Image (tube, rainbow, N blue to C red):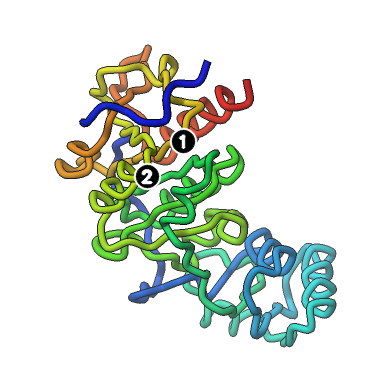
């Protein structure tokens, strides 16, 4: 039985690799990697200006599919030597393809919160692009209805994020906010539950009574976890039970477990 919509007042890890050449205020304009570029072209959510294809890459059937998709979408295709792909790339493995597109459209947070089936994932200070991309991939495959990202002291939607997300960036609505704590205040006013995920949470994720209610799943930063202000605004702090010697999961692994469990409960 679903819990009431209104409620009473109220993974950690070390950052890893980053983009080779980070850019400020990145909103996904440069997309690298075959899966990411394919989803960019298939989704058709934003305008694609140009696709660079390596003339010396292996697995030509995959690049041939990308060329066909780009042509069908009326996108300019430019074959270039492999060394030019490497010079333009901002990730370590562009896989012979780089696309240039319009920025990822910003979703309205109030619209996302107003969805009766809201299942949002908010990232509170995640700075590693690989983690952010992996979290977005897990969120999208679990049926999340949107992601909430802070515009300060957090990873932007860089090429490394788009590649790690493997196309999820093209399907997930993304709301950009100045700070996650303020976004959680807005969620409370909309009657949406705020569920923080932390290793020392006082409730097991697998016993989460609000899993099938409108909610925001809040994930903390690498190393420090949830910030004090975000934690104070959560209605529930849930944890993933650990049965081995390691006390917590990487934030992207924790997100995969949490999103999958919430999706399972909502499907039931």
Category of crowding for the residue at label 2, using alpha-carbon neighbours closer than 10 angstroms: few (below 14), some (14–19), many (at least 20)? some
Circle 1 sits in a helix, a strand or a loop, which is it?
A: loop
Name the image quarter holding residue 243.
top left
Assess disc 1: are there few (<14), some (14-19) or many (≥20) residues with their C-alpha within 10 Å of its C-alpha: many
Task: Tell whether 230 sits left or right of 62.
Answer: left
Mark 2 or 1, which is nearer the eye? Answer: 2
Residue 209: image quadrant is top left
Q: Position of residue 121 (x, y in %)?
A: 43, 44
| Mark 2 vs mark 1, CA separation in Å | 10 Å
Label 1 sits on residue? 214
Q: Position of residue 256 (x, y in %)?
A: 49, 35
Q: Secondary structure at mark 2?
A: loop
Q: Mark 2–mark 1 contact, CB under 8 Å?
A: yes
Residue 101 against residue 105 in the figure, above or below: below
Q: Is residue 197 depicted above or below 126 in this figure?
A: above
**Residue 202 place in picture, x, y as percent:** 25, 18
Residue drawn at (41%, 73%), measured in percent from left and top? 26
Classify the position of the C terminus by image quarter: top right
Residue 257 placement, left or right of 166: left
Q: Where residue 265 sits in the image (x, y, percent)?
A: 55, 22
Which residue: 50% across, 70% down?
A: 28
What residue does disc 2 label? 190
Numbered mark located on residue 43 in the image: none
Q: Is residue 158 above or below residue 127?
A: below
- In the displayed orientation, state which residue is furthest to the left: 228
**N-terminal of the two: label 2 or label 1?**
2
Question: Which is more toward the observer, 224 or 184?
Answer: 184
Front-lying residue, 213 or 63:
213
Q: Residue at x 59, y 54 (%)?
A: 168
Residue at (51% x, 28% y) in the render: 262
């Amino acid at each position: 039985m679903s819990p009431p919509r209104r409620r009473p007042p109220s993974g950690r890890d070390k950052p890893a690799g980053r983009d080779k050449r980070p850019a400020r205020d990145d909103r996904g304009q440069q997309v690298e990697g075959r899966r990411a570029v394919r989803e960019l072209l298939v989704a058709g959510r934003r305008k694609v200006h140009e696709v660079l294809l390596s003339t010396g890459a292996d697995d030509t059937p995959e690049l041939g599919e990308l060329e066909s998709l780009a042509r069908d979408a009326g996108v300019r295709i430019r074959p270039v030597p492999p060394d030019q792909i490497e010079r333009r790339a901002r990730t370590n493995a562009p896989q012979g393809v780089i696309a240039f597109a319009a920025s990822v459209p910003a979703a309205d947070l109030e619209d996302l919160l107003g969805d009766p089936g809201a299942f949002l994932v908010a990232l509170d200070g995640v700075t590693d692009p690989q983690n952010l991309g992996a979290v977005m991939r897990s969120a999208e495959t679990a049926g999340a209805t949107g992601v909430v990202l802070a515009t300060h002291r957090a990873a932007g939607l860089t090429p490394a994020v788009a590649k790690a997300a493997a196309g999820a960036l093209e399907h997930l609505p993304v709301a950009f906010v100045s700070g996650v704590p303020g976004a959680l205040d807005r969620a409370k006013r909309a009657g949406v539950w705020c569920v923080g995920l932390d290793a020392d949470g006082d409730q097991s994720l697998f016993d989460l009574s609000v899993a099938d209610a409108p909610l925001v799943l809040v994930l903390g930063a690498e190393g420090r976890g949830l910030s004090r202000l975000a934690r104070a605004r959560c209605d529930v702090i849930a944890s993933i039970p650990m049965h081995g010697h390691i006390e917590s999961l990487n934030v992207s692994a924790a997100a995969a477990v949490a999103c999958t469990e919430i999706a399972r409960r909502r499907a039931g």
